[in-house]
């Protein structure tokens, strides 16, 4: 395996972690806000708060990992994406900043403030939408070179059906991932009512998810036929993903093994996400930047990988401790430790 | 839209983000150490007051950590968004400490989360205290790695330029540049100093308001001591920084000192103004002091701005930033020294209202000192973004709409700043010390 492949695989893995933990977090905020509108807040809020409180900062770090890592391994991506993403990425930063600090303000400051809860819910939809635009841009067709400097055409971007298909998928995926996870988490708290509500959300969002995902592949055919063809070559990965989706849905429909359903759902997204990533290879940005011409020097690549391994040896036990103390501590989960 | 100058606007936006973030970053580095100190004192002396200090500070800390995290994320991304050409080059050489910083922060965030939610889960309090060690280390390491990057920008090393191409990159050497030792230690010492004086200021203020006397007196006495120790450290390291600058970045020292002509037995000029002939008026001149600061020798020669082409002169305004930093440092050193001597000799004037007010002033002043120090360092590196290799003009983005983005970030920081103050005030007003001491019966933090 070449250093380039190791680098991009590590980064893609981190992005995948972020998408899973981030989606749970984003979706939880949306459901929380929605339950306040419905007056069912008392059912959901407790479950959601108990999950979010100790882990929210950790979620953010996965994201930082990804972008610091991509600049480290592929410095040219800083040049290309840095130049074109000024406005879209700034919007994402501002939303993330509002979300992160509002969360802290709300949960440590003035509890139960409705404005905060709505703000939190709204950013849960807007952040995935704004971040997903980066994936769209990387498909090419929206960027041209002006005197050697990459420039983004907003007109082309916003007129493209692909953009909106990806936005829709990102939002639906957030709601789906989050509801599958929270169904399990609520069932662990032995809160029947909350489990029931979350289960309903899963059933609502399952079909739109597959429709949106299919829509994107269809759109790609027109937009980027190179990528579309390599997706077809990896059809089996997407097929496995589809089967995992179907089993997840079946389990939740029949109210069985919610824990297994979460793992299957993660598997479903892993196959789809890596299928997408592998078929994108070798491009970071069609057609200007590949992982080969954008790669850093060998010395830096090796030091980054070494640091990464050392860092993981430090972090994995700490993360394990965090999860054991909170997510998987039966007393804490059931709210008996407050 | 307003100002169609991506370079200028990129500089302003970076200035804005860094100046806002440094408040939270300083708290993030300094506060865990103070919480640890209080918690440890509480266990050692079996004193509920110190324990309560640790608990209350930890609660406030999460709010500032949250804003610190999000503004830190903003800087991380803005580096690439506003300075894509710089990050393309720098990514090849100095990406390693940036990457390490994320790990350090990750580590800190995990243990802070655990510490905060496990106050009464341990039978042995010392075990709970141990959770703070990674938090404090993580905070200090974050500062270390980021300052390493900044040191690199001031004194690039660990690579060679052969015919305009990067060669022989050594990521470790790039981290351990000549600027690194003084810069890193100065940042850490001043962060601890600032937080100690800020907590002392809060205690002094509460005492004047007639709040719980024993509690705040303890806090005041400990924090003035800690502040004094770190103020001395900051001054000594500052002296070494002067020697570093004289040796490796003489143009920055010369601009900060308005030292135009290379000369021996150079005097140090504090404050003053420049007339049209670049003559200093109304300044305080300390004979030989600049030669001593630069080379520990009153007769030594100090390089002036005349040795550098005009386009490489840093802006002369950094003289004021430099003097603000030094004046604040000296003032705080004197203030805490007098306080400690007075406590030792049982002089009571330090408990008078006027002295308490001086201590209260110490909080904003210390933060002003931090800001001034960074402005001095960053503006003093101009016109370079990477000294001797790339200027800010070459490093900046060419994208349009930087001015619009700037405007939105002003709004964002306004919201976050006001939010922090409102939430912290409410948090501590709703639960004054007296009330918490009464109801103190245990239970995990909420």
Image (cartoon, coloured by chain):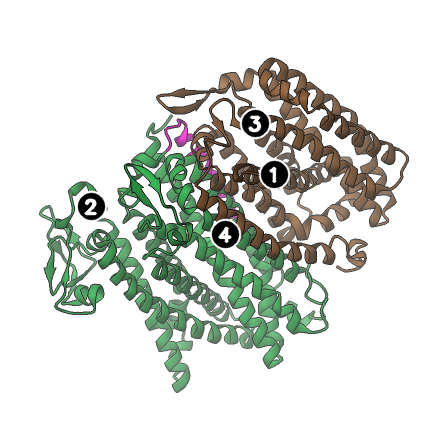
- The extreme left residue here reads B277
Q: Distance between the residues labelled 3 and 2?
A: 42 Å
Q: The brown chain is which one?
A: A
Report whether mark 1 lies on the same chain as mark 4.
no
- Answer whether residue B413 is magenta in the image: yes
Which is more N-terminal, label 3 or label 1? 1
Report whether mark 1 lies on the same chain as mark 2.
no
Report whether mark 1 lies on the same chain as mark 3.
yes
Q: Mark 1 points at which residue?
A: A15
Q: Position of residue B49 (x, y in %)?
A: 59, 74
Q: Mark 4 points at which residue?
A: B101
Q: Where is residue B316 in the image (x, y as percent from the top left)?
A: 21, 48
Q: Name the residue under label 3.
A: A133
Q: In which quarter of the image is residue B50?
A: bottom right
Q: Mark 2 points at which residue?
A: B313
Report in which chain the residue with disc 3 lies.
A
Colour applied to chain B: green
* Residue for point 42% across, 70% down: B227
Q: Distance between the residues labelled 1 and 3?
A: 15 Å
Report whether mark 4 lies on the same chain as mark 2.
yes
* Residue for point 51% across, 66% down: B33
The secondary element bearing badge 2 is classed as loop
Report whether mark 4 lies on the same chain as mark 3.
no
The secondary element bearing badge 1 is classed as helix
Q: How crowded is mark 4: few (under 14 residues within 10 Å), some or many (20 or more)?
A: many
Report in which chain the residue with disc 4 lies.
B
Are discs 3 and 2 less than 8 Å apart at CB?
A: no
The secondary element bearing badge 4 is classed as helix
Q: How crowded is mark 2: few (under 14 residues within 10 Å), some or many (20 or more)?
A: some
């Amino acid at each position: 395996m070449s250093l380039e492949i190791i680098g991009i695989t590590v980064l893609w893995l981190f992005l995948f972690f972020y998408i899973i933990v981030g989606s749970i977090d984003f979706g939880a905020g949306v459901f929380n806000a929605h339950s306040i509108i419905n007056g069912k807040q008392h059912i959901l809020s407790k479950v959601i708060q108990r999950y979010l409180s100790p882990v929210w900062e950790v979620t953010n770090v996965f994201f930082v990992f990804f972008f610091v890592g991509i600049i480290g391994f592929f410095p040219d991506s800083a040049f290309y994406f840095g130049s074109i993403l000024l406005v879209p990425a700034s919007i994402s930063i501002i939303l993330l900043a509002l979300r992160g600090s509002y969360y802290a303000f709300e949960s440590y400051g003035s509890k139960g403030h409705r404005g905060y809860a709505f703000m939190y819910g709204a950013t849960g939809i807007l952040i995935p939408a704004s971040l997903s635009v980066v994936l769209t841009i990387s498909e090419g067709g929206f960027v041209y070179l002006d005197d050697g400097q990459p420039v983004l055409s907003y007109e082309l971007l916003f007129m493209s059906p692909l953009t909106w298909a990806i936005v829709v998928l990102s939002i639906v995926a957030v709601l789906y991932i989050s509801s599958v996870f929270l169904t399990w988490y609520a069932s662990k708290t032995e809160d029947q009512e909350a489990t029931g509500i979350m289960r309903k959300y899963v059933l609502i969002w399952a079909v739109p998810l597959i429709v949106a995902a299919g829509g994107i592949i269809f759109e790609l055919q027109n937009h980027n036929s190179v990528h579309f063809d390599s997706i077809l070559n990896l059809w089996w990965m997407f097929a496995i993903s589809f089967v995992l989706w179907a089993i997840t849905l079946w389990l939740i429909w029949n109210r069985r093994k919610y824990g297994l359903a979460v793992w299957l759902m993660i598997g479903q997204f892993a196959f789809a996400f890596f299928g997408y990533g592998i078929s994108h290879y070798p491009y970071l940005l069609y057609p200007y930047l590949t992982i080969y011409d954008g790669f850093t020097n060998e010395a830096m690549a090796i030091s980054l990988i070494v640091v990464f391994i050392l860092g993981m040896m430090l972090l994995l036990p700490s993360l394990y401790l965090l999860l054991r103390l909170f997510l998987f501590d039966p007393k804490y989960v059931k709210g008996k430790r407050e | 839209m307003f100002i169609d100058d991506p370079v200028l606007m990129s500089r302003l936006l970076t200035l804005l983000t860094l100046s806002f973030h440094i408040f939270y970053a300083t708290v993030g580095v300094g506060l865990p150490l103070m919480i640890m100190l209080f918690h440890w004192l509480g266990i050692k002396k079996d004193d509920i007051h110190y324990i309560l200090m640790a608990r209350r500070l930890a609660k406030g800390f999460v709010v500032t950590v949250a804003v610190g995290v999000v503004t830190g994320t903003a800087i991380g991304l803005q580096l690439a968004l506003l300075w894509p050409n710089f990050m393309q080059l720098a990514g090849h050489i100095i990406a390693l400490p940036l990457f390490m910083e994320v790990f350090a922060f990750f580590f800190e965030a995990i243990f802070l989360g655990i510490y905060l939610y496990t106050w009464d889960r341990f039978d042995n309090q010392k075990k709970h205290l141990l959770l703070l060690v990674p938090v404090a280390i993580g905070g200090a390491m974050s500062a270390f790695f980021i300052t390493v990057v900044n040191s690199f920008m001031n004194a690039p090393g660990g690579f060679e330029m052969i015919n305009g191409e990067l060669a022989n990159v050594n990521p470790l050497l790039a981290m351990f540049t000549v600027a690194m030792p003084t810069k890193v230690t100065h940042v850490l010492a001043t962060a601890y100093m600032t937080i100690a004086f800020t907590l002392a200021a809060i205690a002094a203020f509460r005492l004047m308001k007639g709040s719980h006397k024993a509690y705040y007196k303890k806090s005041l006495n400990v924090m003035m001591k800690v502040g004094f120790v770190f103020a001395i450290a900051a001054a000594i390291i500052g002296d070494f920084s002067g020697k570093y600058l004289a040796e490796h970045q003489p143009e920055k020292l010369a601009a900060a000192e308005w030292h135009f002509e290379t000369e021996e037995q150079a005097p140090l000029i504090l404050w003053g103004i420049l007339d049209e002939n670049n003559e200093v008026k109304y300044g305080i001149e300390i004979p030989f002091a600049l030669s001593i600061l630069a080379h520990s020798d009153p007769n030594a020669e100090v390089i002036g701005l005349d040795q550098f082409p005009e386009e490489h002169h840093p802006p002369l305004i950094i003289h004021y930033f430099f003097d603000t930093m030094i004046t604040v440092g000296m003032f705080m050193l004197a203030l805490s020294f007098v306080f400690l001597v007075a406590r030792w000799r049982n002089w009571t004037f330090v408990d008078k209202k006027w002295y308490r007010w001086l201590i209260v002033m110490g909080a904003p002043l210390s933060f002003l000192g931090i800001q001034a120090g960074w402005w001095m360092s960053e503006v003093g590196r101009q016109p370079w973004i990477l000294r001797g290799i790339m200027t800010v003009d070459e490093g900046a983005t060419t994208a349009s709409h930087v001015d619009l983005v700037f405007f939105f970030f002003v709004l964002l920081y306004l919201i976050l700043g006001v939010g922090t103050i409102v939430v912290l005030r409410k948090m501590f007003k709703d639960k004054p010390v007296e009330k918490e001491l009464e109801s103190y019966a245990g239970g995990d933090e909420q």
